[in-house]
Image (cartoon, rainbow, N blue to C red):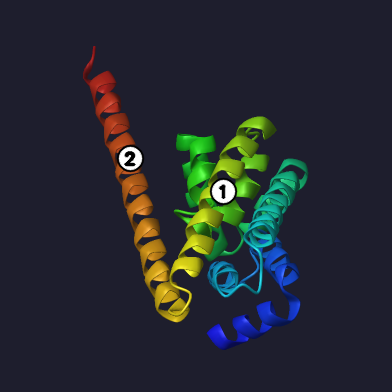
């Protein structure tokens, strides 16, 4: 996989970085984080400029996020009904919805880098649930800046150890997702217990 990514970046440069960042935000299974690490490595070797790589990654990611938000805003109701026919998609949409309901633009910010696998679904849900475009864009832009700085920066610093860094970052993202889901589940259970307690209290009253 790493060799293939290196060949793509070597041949197509920032164009493939832009395309991968854009398409991954639309839920296509593209190893964009590895692409960013590779872009950083090419900066370190002098084959690409830092500004071109950063602009391609940031521009592609923000544009992809905005398209996902727009799709949710226009066709959210119809698409949600279709997507939720699949149990796995219904589950991930539920996670994205809880993140937006509880965190709003902060949830968007986290979805771009800390819990990146949820990112495309958060974009869609943000549009479908009516999160304002300004609040969505604020969280999105700040988050994508962090994403670009982290991955391109790591690729630049550890340019001769890209494969190892990619494995480590993959593990960290998995841990971050697990932690967010655990916290979200805790809040959900707490809300259920509180609702049951209130219901019992109301029932006991004469």
The vertical placement of 46 against 70, above or below, is below
- Say which residue label 2 marks: 187
Secondary structure of the residue carrying numbered label 2: helix
Residue 18, numbered label: none
The image quadrant where one finds the N terminus is bottom right
User: Does residue 19 appear in this view?
Assistant: yes
Which label sits in the foreground, 2 or 1?
1
Residues 41 and 102: in front is: 41
- Say which residue label 1 marks: 145
Residues 86 and 18: in front is: 18
Residue plotted at (73% across, 51% down): 63
Q: CA distance from mark 2 to mark 1?
A: 29 Å
Quadrant of the rendered image containing residue 174: bottom left
Secondary structure of the residue carrying numbered label 1: helix
Name the residue at the front extreme. 46
Quadrant of the rendered image containing residue 32: bottom right
Residue plotted at (56% across, 39% down): 139
Residue plotted at (67% across, 77% down): 9
Quadrant of the rendered image containing residue 51: bottom right
Q: Badge 1: few (under 14), some or many (20 or more) residues near its Cα, within 10 Å?
A: some
Where residue 96 appears, x then y in whole percent? 52, 49
Q: Are marks 2 and 1 in contact (CB under 8 Å)?
A: no
Name the residue at the bottom extreme. 3
User: Does residue 1 appear in this view?
Assistant: no
Lower sequence index among marks 2 and 1? 1
Where residue 78 appears, x then y in whole percent? 73, 49
Residues 25 and 4: in front is: 4
Residues 57 and 198: in front is: 57
Image mark count? 2
The image quadrant where one finds the C terminus is top left
Is 25 left or right of 182, judged from the image as shown? right
Residue plotted at (27% across, 36% down): 193
């Amino acid at each position: 996989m790493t060799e293939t990514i290196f060949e793509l970046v070597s041949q197509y440069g920032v164009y493939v970085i832009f395309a991968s960042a854009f398409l991954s935000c639309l839920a296509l299974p593209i190893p964009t984080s590895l692409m960013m690490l590779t872009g950083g490595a090419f900066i370190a070797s002098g084959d690409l400029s830092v500004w071109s790589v950063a602009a391609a990654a940031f521009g592609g990611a923000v544009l992809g996020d905005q398209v996902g938000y727009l799709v949710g805003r226009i066709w959210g109701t119809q698409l949600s009904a279709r997507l939720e026919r699949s149990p796995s998609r219904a589950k991930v949409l539920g996670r994205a919805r809880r993140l937006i309901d509880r965190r709003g633009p902060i949830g968007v910010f986290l979805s771009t880098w800390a819990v990146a696998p949820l990112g495309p679904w958060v974009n869609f849900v943000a549009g479908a649930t009516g999160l304002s475009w300004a609040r969505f864009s604020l969280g999105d832009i700040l988050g994508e800046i962090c994403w670009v700085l982290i991955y391109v920066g790591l690729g630049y610093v550890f340019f001769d150890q890209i494969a190892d860094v990619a494995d480590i970052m993959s593990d960290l993202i998995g841990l971050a997702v697990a932690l967010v889901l655990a916290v979200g589940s805790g809040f959900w259970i707490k809300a259920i217990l509180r609702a049951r307690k209130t219901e019992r209290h109301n029932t006991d009253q004469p």
